[in-house]
């Protein structure tokens, strides 16, 4: 099956908006495609020093306690365009950035 949906987990975010940033939740593959379990996360960073976690939730209406990490990207002056496949029947995905002290997150997206 080809990927037909691309959603933005975090749009362009330069350093200076705070050390901890959480993107808006976006529907994961299982939200629309019930039972679909493959999501591809892509990102573009320029000189980023931070820890970026892609978090998932199984709850229909998640609270702060319903999120768990499914991918961690840690960088010190990291400049990179890359992707990672994530398997799981998740309802929601979001990006959570911590320790953001330098650089620009160009984007973090999810496709399925």
Image: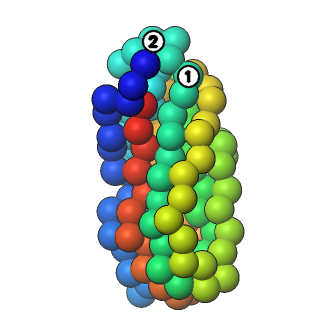
Considering only vertical position in the picture, is 91 above or below 9?
above
Location of residue 37 in the rendering, given as x and y in whole percent from the top left corner: 56, 22
Location of residue 83 in the rendering, given as x and y in whole percent from the top left corner: 54, 52
Q: Quadrant of residue 70?
A: top right
**How many other residues sit within 10 Å of disc 1, few (<14), some (14-19) or many (≥20)?**
some
- Foreground: 16 or 103? 103
- Say which mark, if any, is on residue 110: none
- Foreground: 86 or 62? 86
Q: Secondary structure at mark 2?
A: loop
**Is any part of residue 91 visible from this angle?**
yes
- Say which mark, if any, is on residue 34: 2
Q: Quadrant of residue 68?
A: top right
* Position of residue 21 in the picture relative to residue 72 (left or right): left
Per the image, the residue denoted by label 1 is: 37
* Position of residue 76 in the picture relative to residue 90 (left or right): right
Distance in Å between CA atoms under marks 2 and 1: 9 Å
Location of residue 58 in the rendering, given as x and y in whole percent from the top left corner: 56, 26
Please name the residue shown 31% across and 29% down the image: 4
Considering only vertical position in the picture, is 6 above or below 38?
below
Quarter of the image where the C terminus is located: top left
Q: As drawn, which residue projects farthest toward the front?
A: 2
Location of residue 84 in the rendering, given as x and y in whole percent from the top left corner: 59, 47
């Amino acid at each position: 099956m080809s990927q037909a949906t691309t959603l933005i987990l975090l749009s362009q975010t330069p350093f200076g908006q705070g050390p901890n940033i959480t993107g808006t939740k976006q529907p994961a593959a299982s939200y629309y495609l019930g039972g679909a379990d493959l999501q591809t996360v892509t990102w573009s960073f320029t000189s980023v020093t931070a820890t970026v976690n892609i978090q998932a939730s199984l709850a229909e209406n998640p609270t702060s306690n319903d999120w768990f990490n499914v991918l961690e990207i840690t960088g010190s002056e990291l400049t990179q365009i890359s992707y990672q496949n994530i398997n799981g029947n998740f309802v929601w995905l979001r990006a959570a950035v911590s320790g953001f002290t330098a650089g620009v997150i160009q984007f973090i997206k999810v496709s399925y």
